[in-house]
Every structure is written in C-alpha cells, then in structure tokens.
Amino acid sequence: MRIVCVHIPDLSVQAVLRERFDDVNIQVPLALVEGPEERRRVVAASTFAYDCGVRPPQSLAAARGTCPEIVVVPNDPEQTREALHSIADVLRSFGPIVSLAPPFDAFVDTTGVAGVDVSCLAIAETVRLLGFEVKVAAATTPFAAQALASHAATFEHPVEHAPGTPENRAVGRLPLSAAGLPPQTFESLRVVGIRTVGAFM
C-alpha cells in the first residue's frame, strides 16, 4: 500500500485567512473565538497572533491585552469542514479512495495508480493551488503517513517498493507527540524517558 496524508496545519485559521484576505500567509493577528459574549475564549490563532503572545485557551480579554490590534472572528466549524472537503475533492484526481480525519488531515490511497504523478510534491502543489499551506507524506499505513506529515518529516514511500526498514526508521525518529496518544498517557511515558515513537513501539 501507499497512503498519502495531506496535513493542513491550523485549517480553521487558514480557511478564514483564505476567505477574508485571499492569502493564508498574510501577517494578520487573527484569533478564532468561541463561547458566550462575556466569556469568549481563543480556540485558534494565526502564526502572527502567536508571535504577539496570543495562545488558546486565553480569554478574549487577555488576548486583547496581549495584542490590542487582534482581529477577532467567531469560530465556524462548518467553514473548516467545507475547506477540508474541497481538499478531498482535489485529492480524488490522485486516487480513487479518499478519506478524511478532521480537523487537519486528508488521505488518498495511491496504491497502483498509473498515469498520474502521485509524488508528495505534486500533491502538495495541487492543494496549494486552492490556497492552503500543507504538509504531505507518503507511507504504507495511514498512521505512519499522518505522523510523518504532521511533523514535516522528509521520508516519502516510493510508488513501487516493498514496505520495510527505512519507513520504520523515519517514523521511529519522530517525537512521541506524533503517536497521537491521550495527554495523560503521553505525559506518563515522557516522565519515564520515552520521548520518541520508536522508543514507544
């Protein structure tokens, strides 16, 4: 098998920046907020807002105290879902089986696909034409592809190659956070010195 994962960091923020400014890389201190008017909290923030000190789950008042010029937008999960589905539509040109792992990931099975460039570079460039910044990785399992993509690892499983050690080594070198463990489990393992996926396995 050859599964490609397209990881879209902070998709909810990217979707808003794309819609409002037509540029996901624009230097705008944007914060997405949820909750009642008097108790709104930041649930996501742009890179520029992070650089200004804004962090989820700050209260909106604290975020404004940190960054007075912050642009505040109500979080819209439906907008994020629509963005992920638009990416999935594009991925169908690379393989017949596309699946979603909200909120940040989409997968396409490129096993046996011929006549189309299914390299990570080609897939990334195609999705970027939609206006999103992405990280893409290919592996023999969805877990490995997602772990590699979310951590911007450079390994790319070839279109035709037997599964084996190079992929295992690439995944094993990733930090333990790539395993997607519950916070309590992650912290317990970290305390006893397990800090990579390889050590965990």
Image (cartoon, rainbow, N blue to C red):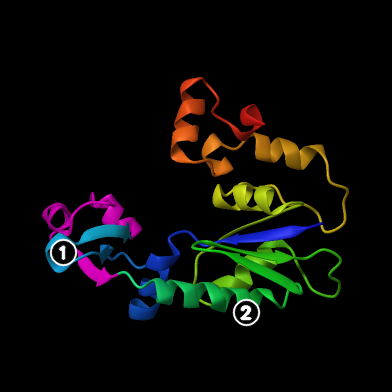
- Of 122 and 5, nearer the camera is 5
Query: In the image, 47: left or right of 62?
Result: right
Camera sees residue 26: yes
Q: Which residue is mark 1?
A: 69
- Boundaries of the magenta span: 46-74
The answer to which image quadrant residue 28 occupies is bottom left
The answer to which image quadrant residue 79 occupies is bottom left
The answer to which image quadrant residue 96 occupies is bottom right
x then y, percent, for residue 73 = 26, 71
Mark 2 Cα-neighbour bin, 10 Å: few <14, some 14–19, many ≥20: few
**Residue extending furthest top?**
192
- Of 186 and 122, nearer the camera is 186
x then y, percent, for residue 155 = 69, 47
Q: Which residue is mark 2?
A: 89
User: Mark 1 falls on what kind of element?
Assistant: loop
| Amino acid bearing label 2 | Asp
- Say which residue appears at 82% left-offset and 56% top-offset: 1
| Amino acid bearing label 1 | Glu
Mark 1 Cα-neighbour bin, 10 Å: few <14, some 14–19, many ≥20: some
